[in-house]
DNA sequence: TAGATTGTTAATCGATTAACAATC
DNA sequence: TAGATTGTTAATCGATTAACAATC
């Protein structure tokens, strides 16, 4: 159940890939079961690694059959908490914020974006898809009203730090930050920084340094952080 | 110069963070030099790791002074190829595509988005910021015309695979994929999958499993892949 | 049954950290 | 000079892979 031992970060990063592959590739193909070898071939890792990971989240396979897709999916959902609602506010109702807010795929991860905030007068009081956009002055009140536990930050860099401080004080427990800024938040709150330039950096390196590539699809983390030194 | 030995992936993922921190935090503060301890405290890693990384890209520090910011920045730019132009096309002129295309910060990484493609008639012939949007029928012609070596995919999942195949055949060498799809491309081409649900998965896990967090800011990769099994 | 696949312990590999001499 | 910080080799740690018995 909940509260198995703590998972290592690498495992946490791989599980959503298994989830994604099974739901979007294996199941649509009509597969009821999936072998560790199949997942491994896809993700370009050793099949033992897959079995280790699945054992950690308590899924049992059947010799000669593999793992039942439905069981793997259920175990991942349960382990990662996809089956529990995450009440979120998105701050920054620009194009990126709009893209995230209107993407329906995140629902299968339990994300519920209940409100948006934005400073630009032109955008205030507007709707972002089906989500209401509030002026930034009301940030704290809105967070409390919708009981947001997660804040998604899609404001420009200059505004990100202040927004982070405010959402933190208003009681949010996690931040998903898309602004290319270094947020200074307390230790109590978890921040995941999606620094897109890291992706660009890798592409740049590959583009300029390599001609051919070995194949590989790897589960790999993005920026995570906790608060900086006191 | 170019062509030092191949860097390990972890190093490639950390360098842009150093770059980002120095340019956005240290330099604006007026620092001319930066110590490995300062970078380490920020990124929550051991300072030895920083010195190892910087040694790998050929930066020399000065005892009691640290590393010159300008030298570190120059070395990272040169190593990762930020100082060389990357000609790109973005396919999918929706909100996410628009956000990426109009973000000016990528210029300091050498990214030049020269054209956009989109299938929706309403968007055809429009401009995306200062970038012209072409209909998808002309994809191959546009890629050849602008000599794109990088394709940024921001189309919906259903369209992603076909787009990937087409850009590949048209000669693009790298794909930066934001669609939550498994692209099937040849070994010759490098793909970086920015699967955002991985980030959401980690937040979900933290939100449901932890109360307090140790601090840490870690350089961490996102999805990378090379072509799948033949 | 034979054979494919899981499950798990042990070995390996590689990234990180420790230790400490060198340097300004 | 003394002291802070780099540079580098060696040790550690942890993730991945190998090996192989168990199972259906």
Image (cartoon, coloured by chain):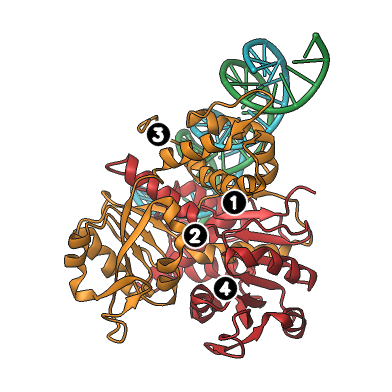
Chain colours: A orange, B red, C green, D cyan
- Looking at the picture, how far across and down is residue B169, in whole percent? 79, 69
Choose mark 4 or mark 3, whichever is in front.
Answer: 3
- Of the numbered discs in the image, which one, if any, rests on residue A6? 3
Q: CA distance from mark 1 to mark 4?
A: 33 Å
Please tell me the numbered disc located at residue B109: 4
Choose the circle earlier in sequence order: 2 or 4.
2
- Label 4 marks which chain's residue? B
Disc 1 to disc 2, how far (Cα)? Answer: 53 Å
Disc 4 to disc 3, C-alpha distance: 37 Å
Q: Quadrant of residue A111?
A: bottom left
CB under 8 Å between discs 2 and 3: no
Identify which residue is drawn at 44% across, 57% down: A106
- Helix, strand or loop at label 2? It is loop
Dot 4: what SS? helix
User: In this figure, which residue is indicated by the disc labeled 2?
Assistant: B62
Cβ–Cβ below 8 Å for labels 1 and 2?
Answer: no
Q: Residues within 10 Å of mark 3 (few under 14, many from 20)?
A: few
Residue at mark 1: A24
At x 19% / y 75%, what residue is drawn?
A: A137
């Amino acid at each position: 159940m909940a509260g198995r031992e703590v998972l290592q970060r690498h495992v946490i990063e791989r599980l959503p890939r298994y989830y994604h592959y099974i739901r979007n590739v294996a199941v649509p193909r009509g597969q009821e079961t999936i072998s560790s070898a199949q997942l491994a071939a896809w993700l370009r890792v050793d099949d033992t690694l897959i079995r280790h990971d699945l054992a950690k989240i308590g899924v049992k396979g059947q010799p000669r059959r593999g793992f039942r897709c439905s069981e793997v999916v259920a175990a991942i959902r349960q382990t990662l908490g996809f089956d529990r609602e995450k009440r979120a506010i998105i701050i920054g109702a620009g194009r990126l914020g709009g893209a995230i807010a209107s993407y329906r795929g995140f629902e299968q991860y339990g994300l519920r974006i209940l409100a948006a905030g934005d400073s630009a007068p032109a955008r205030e009081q507007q709707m972002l898809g089906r989500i209401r956009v509030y002026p930034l002055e009301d940030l704290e009140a809105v967070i409390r009203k919708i009981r947001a536990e997660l804040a998604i930050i899609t404001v420009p860099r200059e505004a990100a730090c202040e927004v982070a401080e405010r959402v933190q004080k208003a009681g949010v427990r996690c931040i998903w930050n898309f602004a290319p800024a270094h947020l200074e938040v307390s230790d109590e709150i978890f921040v995941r920084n999606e620094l897109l330039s890291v992706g660009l950096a890798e592409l740049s390196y590959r583009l300029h340094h390599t001609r051919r590539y070995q194949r590989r699809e790897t589960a790999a983390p993005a920026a995570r952080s906790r608060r900086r030194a006191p």
